[in-house]
Image (spheres, rainbow, N blue to C red):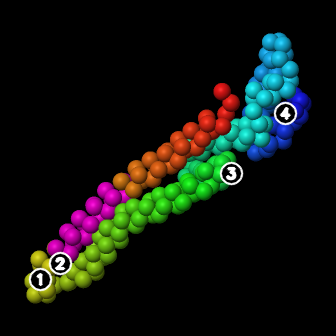
Amino acid sequence: MTKEQFLQTLENRLSGVPKEERKDILHDYLEHFEEAALDGRSEEEAVRNLGDPVKLAKSHRMEYMIDRTENATQPDIRLASFLLLLLTFFGLSFFNLIVMIPVFVFLLTLLLGVWTIALMPLAIGAALLLGALHFIPLTLGSFILDGLFAHLSVLFGGLGALGLGFLFLLAAVWITKGFFKAVVHYIKLNIKAIQPK
């Protein structure tokens, strides 16, 4: 493969990367070819040292998507970038496709369970509070007859469940952020593994 073929393949495969970043990437590889020529190496040898331009382009696209995912400020854009990053990532290698997708689905299922556990006390607490507030009697006599203790226990039980639910919710957010960071870190390790030394 010649220098021109390498650079053309790389440029064609860098679709989705902004023009300025694409230009910088191509400039870096062009410099590599110039350094190889100064050292007396042929274009073919420089291409062999760089590796497959298709894999290199995938790696650069992944790096761009990781930056986009990590720097997104809006949750919906961050989630969309993350999902696109995952799709590209699983296209990188057979191992990730066969082994990591089931692991990833299992971990997502666990994450869904964490969120379910976090939201249940909130729902129960809200139901108890609404029930306690809705059934508060209007007269003191019926309040004493219906049982002050029963109403207060339902009311405070609802408040307690809400408080517990908010704690679980904070834990679920923390676990979710950790999960996304771990996945991005694993993808970065994969990118380092396919990049030439």
Kind of element beneath mark 4: helix
Residue 181 higher or lower than 125, as above or below = above
Classify 10 Å Cα crowding around label 4: few (below 14), some (14-19), many (20 and above): many
Mark 4 or 2: in front is 4
| Residue contact at pointers 2 and 1, CB within 8 angstroms | yes
Residue 63 as seen in the image, left or right of residue 9: left
| Residue contact at pointers 3 and 1, CB within 8 angstroms | no
Marks 1 and 4, how far apart at CA = 83 Å
Mark 3 sits on what residue?
91
Q: Image point 66% across, 48% down: which residue? A: 93
Mark 1 sits on what residue?
147
Query: Which comes sooner in the sequence, label 3 or label 2?
Result: 3
Three-letter amino acid code of the residue under disc 2? His
Residue 105 as seen in the image, left or right of residue 174: right
Q: Image point 66% across, 37% down: which residue? A: 194
Marks 4 and 3, how far apart at CA = 21 Å
Kind of element beneath mark 2: helix
Kind of element beneath mark 1: loop
Mark 2 sits on what residue?
151
Kind of element beneath mark 3: loop
Task: Residue 73: say if magenta.
Answer: no
Q: Image point 43% across, 61% down: which residue? A: 110
Classify 10 Å Cα crowding around label 3: few (below 14), some (14-19), many (20 and above): few
Query: Which comes sooner in the sequence, label 3 or label 1?
Result: 3
